[in-house]
Image (tube, helix red, strand yellow):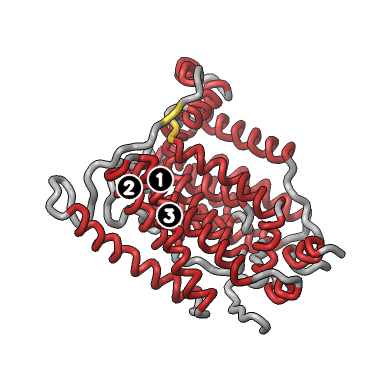
Amino acid sequence: MSTDAMLSTAASGTPEAPKRRRLGTARILLIISGVLIGLSLVHLLTGADDVTSQGAIQAALQAAIPLGLAGLGGLWAERAGVVNIGLEGQMILGTWFGAWGSIEYGPWAGLALGILGGALGGLIHALATVTFGVDHIISGVAMTILAPGVARYLSFLAWNGTPGAGPTQSPTVKPLPRVSVPGVDSLASLEKHHWFLISDLAGILRGLLVDVSVVTILAVLLIPLTWLLLWRTSFGLRVRSVGEDPQAAESLGINVYRYKYYGVVISGAMAGLGGVFLSTVSSVIYREGQTGGRGYIGLAAMIFGNWRPGGLALGASLFGYTDALQLRRGSESVHALLILVGALLLALAVWETIRRNRVVAIASAVLGVLSYVIFFAVDKIPTALVQAAPYITVLVVLALAAQRLRPPAADGKPYRRGG
């Protein structure tokens, strides 16, 4: 058996585990079509225009991108066997260095420096956990505590006394360019007609393809690129093998320390790019506390996606969409979506009943019925519940999917050469 074949066995976890059916392209397209039709029906039945409007989709994309990048960062680190709780701190470094680089040297330099700032945070985390054997959680928490202090100190040095800026915020940042797909914006007339499915599709396309930042395009491309690198190259095979069984990888001549470093540094770079998005795309200014816990939510999106790029992107999109709705007539939009949520939960209950998974089936059925009870009992969702909707959504999905989740076998476990 070749070295790559033996590494593939190590990277796939226990060989005797049954193979699970993966979603093919046809099934993914079928799911997307089903969701689109469901949203169109919700729009038709309730008149909630913001469910599929251009503005809602743009806001959802803007909310999802930093979460997805943080989740990709967590994916790279944990596939290499290192838990990176420090993603929040690495995002903070990305926000600061991205803004500073953009102000001093231009937006493209800011993009590069923000990525390097996050990678530096990843390197520090790797040094602590991989080389010195510090507990992964302790090192990550320390990184998250340290990064705001570093950013405050650097802000004081760079911008103290600058008009409109200071230790807690930067001057206005030079934004990166935005692009639009030619002809798509002309679909605005179709969107205004509110025709079933056609107008909804027009709004979604305009939200996804008009006035899009180059950082958004880069972030979207990183999803398939991560999959290709981790699952279709020898480099990715080695990274995954040290996260599943480092002793087996070591016995095949792999430098486990080196590949753990690769994973964690790339993880920090991804988080840094998420920080650049926040300070140069979401807003054209760096502000203290700008990340707002997105590093932790990105980890939740990664777990939701079962440590895979496609599932992670779905989790980040789900959170971003529900988060965006609260900003655009949230009470009306969230109330309308209860129709679709209830239908999906009841369908899941039927599916899990067929599969004889009684616990998930009962839980799904109860939540589905509860969704319809709330929909018919009230005309308006309370503001507090609307604001909590993204977090409730993630918790419910994680709870229902918990039995199918499988982290890398050696994730978070200490490793010493020859051990």
Relative to residue 317, is residue 379 drawn left or right? left
Kind of residue at disc 2 = Gly
Label total for image: 3
Q: Which residue is drawn at 36% across and 54% down?
A: 291
Dot placed on the residue nearer the N-terminal end, 3 or 2:
2
Q: 76 or 201: nearer the eye? A: 76
Q: Residue at x 67, y 50 (%)?
A: 348
Residue 70 seen = yes
Label of residue 111 in the image: 1
Label of residue 116 in the image: 3
Q: Is mark 3 on a helix, strand or loop?
A: helix
Tell me if mark 3 has few (under 14), some (14-19) or many (20+) residues whose alpha carbon lies within 10 angstroms of its own: many
- The percent position of residue 34, horizontal first and vertical second, equals 65, 35
Relative to residue 169, is residue 378 drawn left or right? right
Relative to residue 367, is residue 212 drawn left or right? left
Contact? badges 1 and 2 (CB < 8 Å): yes
- The percent position of residue 44, horizontal first and vertical second, equals 53, 27
Contact? badges 3 and 1 (CB < 8 Å): no
Q: Distance between the residues labelled 3 and 1?
A: 9 Å
133 versus 388 height, above or below: below
Kind of residue at disc 3 = Leu
The quarter of the rendered structure image containing the N terminus is bottom right
Kind of residue at disc 1 = Leu
Q: What element carries label 2?
A: helix
Q: 180 or 105: nearer the eye? A: 105
Dot placed on the residue nearer the N-terminal end, 3 or 1:
1
192 versus 374 height, above or below: above
As drawn, the residue found furthest toward the bottom would be: 419
Relative to residue 223, is residue 349 drawn left or right? right
Contact? badges 3 and 2 (CB < 8 Å): no
